[in-house]
């Protein structure tokens, strides 16, 4: 059992962050758009590569940190579609992608409410869907992601441990309750495989049966 902070820190620091991701992280933290940790970002790259992702949908662009990690794991001609309500977040993400040498045809940034934008995206047209939006809406995001992802594809939710609150039964705020409900739902669904990864604030990875 991994129980020490030192072991968790070792796992987080296994893949050091480059300057592009570090700069995007600084912008995100300044805006209050808390990005995925370096360890969680490395996991996103790994998961994107594991499904040979050519099309990825992202809910919550932030300042582009998670997008950078996803794009690095995707096929060289893969396209990231990222949705965020804040235009300023997407402006910074676009700058981060450009600074990292990512061609503009490899990303599509859509400003708007995810629950309004996602229904317009193509059914089963994505290899991976990454969710880092409003925690209370995680159940609704799962519904949309199940429609969007292809058989055998992967859905990943950030903040699956929600600042250590999910593991504490005394915590019953709406965000924590919604994440617990999500975890229970995917665990009990026979057509889904799930894995809770304790990196960053927790990643819940869900694979749709092929």
Image: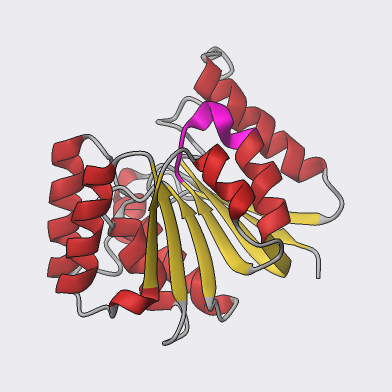
Locate residue 103, reporting x and y percent. Answer: 28, 80
| 175 in relation to 34, above or below | above
Identify the residue at horizontal 53%, vertical 24% (top origin).
176
Locate residue 28, reporting x and y percent. Answer: 21, 45
Identify the residue at horizontal 56%, vertical 81% (top origin).
52
Specify the principal SS of the magenta part. Answer: helix
- What span is in magenta? 132-139
198 and 23: which is toward the camera: 23
Locate residue 27, reporting x and y percent. Answer: 14, 48
133 and 50: which is toward the camera: 133
Which quadrant is the C terminus positioned in? bottom right
Identify the residue at horizontal 46%, vertical 38% (top origin).
113
162 and 178: which is toward the camera: 178
Identify the residue at horizontal 54%, vertical 17% (top origin).
174
* Residue 192 in sight: yes
| 138 in relation to 73, above or below | above
Locate residue 6, reporting x and y percent. Answer: 29, 50
View extreme (front): residue: 120
* Residue 12 in sight: no
Applied colour scheme: secondary structure
Quarter of the figure with residue 19: bottom left
Q: Is residue 180 left or right of residue 53?
A: right
View extreme (bottom): residue: 76
Quarter of the figure with residue 181: top right
Q: Is residue 158 magenta?
A: no
| 115 in relation to 166, above or below | below
């Amino acid at each position: 059992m991994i129980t020490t902070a030192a072991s968790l820190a070792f796992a987080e620091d296994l893949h050091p962050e480059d300057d592009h991701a570090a700069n995007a992280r600084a912008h995100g933290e300044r805006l209050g758009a808390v990005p995925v940790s370096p360890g969680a970002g490395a996991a996103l790259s790994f998961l994107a590569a594991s499904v040979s992702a050519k099309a990825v949908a992202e809910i919550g662009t932030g300042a582009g940190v998670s997008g950078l990690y996803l794009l690095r794991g995707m096929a060289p001609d893969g396209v990231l579609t990222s949705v965020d309500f804040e235009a300023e977040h997407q402006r910074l993400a676009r700058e981060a992608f450009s600074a990292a040498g990512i061609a503009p045809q490899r990303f599509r940034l859509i400003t708007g409410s995810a629950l309004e934008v996602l229904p317009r995206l193509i059914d089963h047209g994505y290899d991976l869907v990454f969710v880092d939006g409003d925690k209370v809406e995680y159940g609704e995001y799962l519904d949309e992601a199940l429609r969007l992802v292809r058989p055998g594809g992967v859905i990943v939710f950030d903040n699956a441990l929600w600042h250590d609150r999910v593991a504490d039964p005394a915590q019953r705020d709406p965000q924590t309750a919604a994440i617990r409900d999500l975890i229970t739902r995917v665990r009990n669904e026979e057509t889904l495989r799930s894995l809770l990864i304790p990196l960053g604030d927790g990643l819940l990875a869900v694979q749709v049966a092929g």
